[in-house]
């Protein structure tokens, strides 16, 4: 698998499978996607069936054109979709990408599903794509995501002020984090060891 193969990439570990979103996934997403808390810090929100249609159409289009690679996160035990995540801001020449646009169903928060998805994405980014840097960004107000990124061992790099508009008109400040290639082996062993052997969080 290379950068050219990203639209068809399937990532797996003991807990989750990540594969590109399909039109036929609509019913699966409809079961889990309508939760206000999921979208509190997102620039776009899914509140109606029309919003869900737009999400699916955009995810598929972005993946096929290489703008982003948007994955459905599937729980391997149940076979159900439990959320989504993506590779974006792909900079092949600089061996850099962003992991983001990540969410899991409200009922799955704190169960390790999101962490397992992050592990699959990070393993592929560093071990297969040869990335030198993986970055993340989040709303400065998103304390849950910020704690999660710190728990992964990502380094907080700074805040970009007045970065973009949020629904309702607020100007969002975003905080950037990163993990570098030379940091990953130690972080993987220290922060992901239980997941690496399939026992969850």
Image (cartoon, helix red, strand yellow):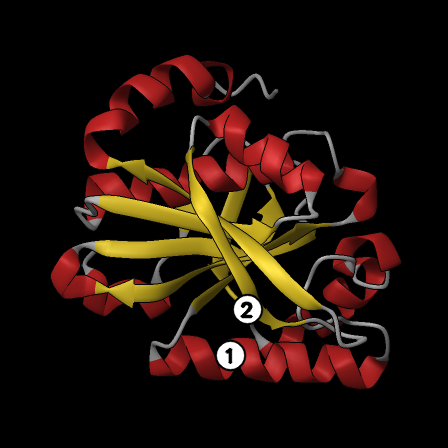
Q: Residue at x 81, y 46 (%)?
A: 106
Distance from the alpha carbon under mark 1 to that under mark 2: 6 Å
Circle 2 residue:
21
Specify the quadrant that holds the C terminus.
top right
Percent coordinates x, y for residue 107 in the rendering = 83, 41
Q: Relative to 18, is 74 on the left or the right?
A: right
Q: Read off the residue under disc 1.
A: 60
Q: Position of residue 145 (x, y in %)?
A: 63, 41
User: Which of these two is toward me, 15 or 109?
Assistant: 109
Q: Nearer the viewer, residue 116 or 143?
A: 143
Q: Residues within 10 Å of mark 1 (few under 14, many from 20)?
A: many
Find residue 197 and report its horizontal and vertical position in percent: 45, 16
- Which is nearer the N-term, disc 1 or disc 2? 2
The answer to whether the residue labelled 1 contacts the one labelled 2, judged by CB atoms less than 8 Å apart, is yes
Quarter of the figure with the N terminus: bottom left
Q: Is residue 176 above or below residue 39?
A: above
Q: Which residue shows up at 44% across the image and 45% down it?
A: 158
Residue at the spot 64% in from the left edge and 63% down from the top edge: 172
Residue drawn at point x = 72 percent, y = 73 percent: 26
Q: How many marks?
A: 2
Residue situated in front as seen by the camera: 72 or 170: 170
Note whether 136 is above or below 72 in the view shown.
above
Q: Secondary structure at mark 2?
A: loop
Which element is circle 1 on? helix
Residue 56 seen anywhere in this rendered image of the structure? yes
Residue 66: quarter of image:
bottom left
> Where is residue 180 shown, x and y percent of the image?
26, 36
Category of crowding for the residue at label 2, using alpha-carbon neighbours closer than 10 angstroms: few (below 14), some (14–19), many (at least 20): many
């Amino acid at each position: 698998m290379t950068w050219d193969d990203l639209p068809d990439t399937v990532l797996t570990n003991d807990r989750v499978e990540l594969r590109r979103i399909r039109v036929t996934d609509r019913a699966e997403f409809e079961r889990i996607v309508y939760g206000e808390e999921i979208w509190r810090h997102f620039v776009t929100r899914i509140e109606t069936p029309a919003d869900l249609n737009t999400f699916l159409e955009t995810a598929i289009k972005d993946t096929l054109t290489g703008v982003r690679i948007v994955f459905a996160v599937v729980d391997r035990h149940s076979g159900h979709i439990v959320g989504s995540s993506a590779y974006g801001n792909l900079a092949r020449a600089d061996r850099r990408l962003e992991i983001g646009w990540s969410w899991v169903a409200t009922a799955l928060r704190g169960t390790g599903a999101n962490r397992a998805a992050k592990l699959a994405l990070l393993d592929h980014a560093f071990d297969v794509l040869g990335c030198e840097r993986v970055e993340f960004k989040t709303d400065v107000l998103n304390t849950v995501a910020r704690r999660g990124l710190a728990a992964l061992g990502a380094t907080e790099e700074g805040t970009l002020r007045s970065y973009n508009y949020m629904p309702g008109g607020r100007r969002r400040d975003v905080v950037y984090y990163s993990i570098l290639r030379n940091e990953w082996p130690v972080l993987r062993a220290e922060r992901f060891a239980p997941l690496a052997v399939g026992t969850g969080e």
